[in-house]
Image: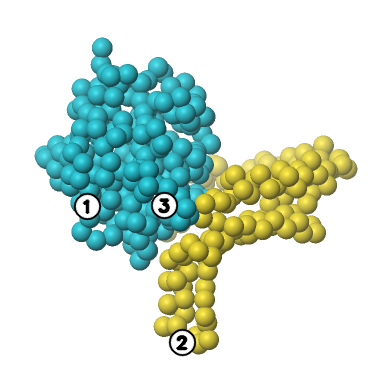
Amino acid sequence: MAQRRAVGQSRFSGGPRHLGGGAANRVNYARRVPTTCVNKEQPAVARVVVDVMPKPEILDPQGQAALGAAGRLGFTGIKEIRQGKHFEIEVDDTVDDATLEKIAEGFLANPVIEQWTITRVDA
Amino acid sequence: MSARIGVITFPGTLDDGDAARAVTYADAEAVPLWHADEDLRGVDAVVVPGGFSYGDYLRAGVIARFAPVMTSVIEAARAGMPVLGICNGFQILCEAGLLPGAMIRNQGLHFICRDQWLRVENTDTAWTSRYEQGAEILIPMKNIDGCYVAEQSTLDALEAEGRVVFRYVGGNPNGSRNDIAGIRSENGRVVGLMPHPEHAIDALTGPSDDGLGMFYSAVDALVKA
């Protein structure tokens, strides 16, 4: 019958090899940081917020469900909840307002059911 | 030579297998089309099947609408090629502007999965010519963003021009305006509907074989062309 080993005692002589070697064998991750990024000029980045909301005449079942739940939770005085989407976009200075309008109208929002606002905010 | 009908697969498409099977049942050749490929491989018609293309991220169908294959589908549809959008495919065709309106979250917020009775309201399309006007058909529906909405002027035009192709009967399941389950383009070549005809082509695997008529209709339209 095999001899019982104490918990944590290696069954190989010399200990587990993959942990050996000490500091000399450790990968120096710090050295892998590329130095080429440093001091390089970055293009100006602006933050843009696009808020998309269902049109007032479009039914908003999610907002209605939240409104109902708020009442059941005991919050009083809440008249209406409408649910939309909030996009935070970072753009460089090659992106003009006309392009942002195209992105909002043709992609982030569906003009059939949604309306949107575009706001440039300070970074 | 049998008609060649393409079936598109996007990342997240679920029903391309059943759509291809339905095409084959109608004695046409099912040609797989890939979302990232502009080549329509010489097909005579296209089915945009259901599922959750691109995870329905942003809005159901919007990212798929910009896939390379859709550029070719939009161009071909405008030139008169028959195109059928089922469920997510219907949403994609609406986002692409081939059909008017949009789908929003179901009233009541439930994912609805059941066999649904529809009335065929218009048979003057490439996809419904085999049905009798007013026929009631039973096919599965399974979606959460199935509530059809459009501006009142658009709804009025759809009704006036006979472009409502399918209407829910036996109660409106999801709040769709005017009980609309499916619509067509002005020329009747493009049809979109939320329920799934491709799941109802054989009584062994579906509630009926009522859906098969859509694929036979397409084959008829292509033979006549």
- Tag 2 near tag 3, CB within 8 Å: no
Task: Check disc 3 and give the amino acid type.
Answer: Asp
Residue extending furthest toward the front: B160
Label 3: few (<14), some (14–19) or many (≥20) C-alpha neighbours in 10 Å: few
- Indicate the position of residue A81 as horizontal and vertical percent values: 52, 73
Q: Which mark is residue A108?
A: none
Is B124 positioned to the left or the right of A110 in the image? left
Q: Look at chain B in the picture and name its colour.
A: cyan
> In the rendered structure, the residue with mark 1 lies on which chain?
B
Specify the quadrant of the image occupied by residue B182: top left
Q: Nearer the viewer, mark 3 or mark 1?
A: 3
Q: Look at chain A in the picture and name its colour.
A: yellow
Q: Which residue is mark 1?
A: B116
Q: Is residue B112 above or below residue A64?
A: above
- Indicate the position of residue B117 as horizontal and vertical percent values: 20, 51
Q: Earlier in the sequence, mark 3 or mark 1?
A: 1
Callout 3 and callout 1 share a chain: yes
Residue extending furthest toward the left: B204
Q: Which mark is residue A74?
A: 2
Whether residue B8 can be seen here: yes
User: Which of the pair B135/B153 is nearer the observer?
Assistant: B153
Q: Nearer the viewer, mark 2 or mark 3?
A: 3
Q: What residue is shown at x 22% (from left), y 52% (from top)?
A: B116
Task: Check disc 2 and give the amino acid type.
Answer: Gly
